[in-house]
Image (tube, helix red, strand yellow):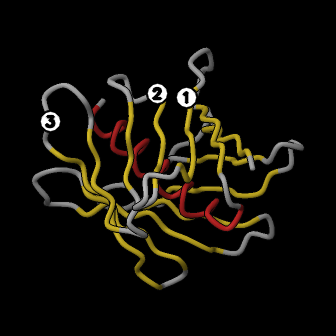
Amino acid sequence: MKLLFKQRIFSWLDSYDIYNEQGEKVYTVKGELAWGHCLKIMDQYGKNIGTVKEKVFTFLPKFELYVGENYLGCVCKEFTFFRPQFVIDFNGWNIQGNVLEWDYEIQDQAGRVVAMVNKEVFHLADTYVMEIGKPEDALYVLMLVLAIDAEKCSRQ
């Protein structure tokens, strides 16, 4: 399964549209005014299905993941000198990426690839292509990509 993640250019808060391979919008992400990033994920019918929320007052960036009101886990930035590193406290997954944080893969505990994420560079707004092995993992992969993109935005 392939999803295309596009940030809206003219928006006061973080807003994204996520499309499937047929060009149909399958998710909409809207930022809320809050301390730190708070991103609400809606399905194609406008129902809130997930949230990525930044914890404030932490030494390194930390994002909590929710499906509905249920806490799933978190994504934390680790202190490293050369290569960005994130710790995922969810599903036993981990992320391996390159120095520029444009391309990375999400792996399960056994080292199998759950998803490949590639940033397309020649666009005005952030655009990522997510190749996801299992459709049931799409929402979770989207949450991780949102957390990493929000962390990068906070740094800039």
What is the total number of numbered labels drawn onto the structure image? Answer: 3
Q: Residues within 10 Å of mark 2 (few under 14, many from 20)?
A: some
| Picture layout, residue 49 above or below residue 151 | below
Among all residues in the image, which is located at the extreme front?
Answer: 110
Sequence-wise, the earlier of marks 1 and 3 is 3
Query: Looking at numbered disc 2 in the image, what kind of residue is underneath it?
Result: Trp
- How many angstroms separate mark 2 from mark 1 (CA)? 5 Å
Q: Which residue is mark 1?
A: 119
User: Residue placed at 43% from the left, 59% from the top?
Assistant: 110
Sequence-wise, the earlier of marks 3 and 2 is 3
Q: Left or right: 12 with respect to 127?
A: left
User: Residue placed at 40% from the left, 61% from the top?
Assistant: 109
SS class, disc 1: strand
Q: Is the residue under label 1 in contact with that under label 2 (CB below 8 Å)?
A: yes
On residue 80, which mark appears? 3
| Picture layout, residue 9 above or below residue 2 | above
Nearest the eye: 16 or 98: 98
Q: Position of residue 64 (x, y in %)?
A: 35, 67
Residue 83 location, quadrant: top left
Q: Left or right: 132 with respect to 113?
A: right
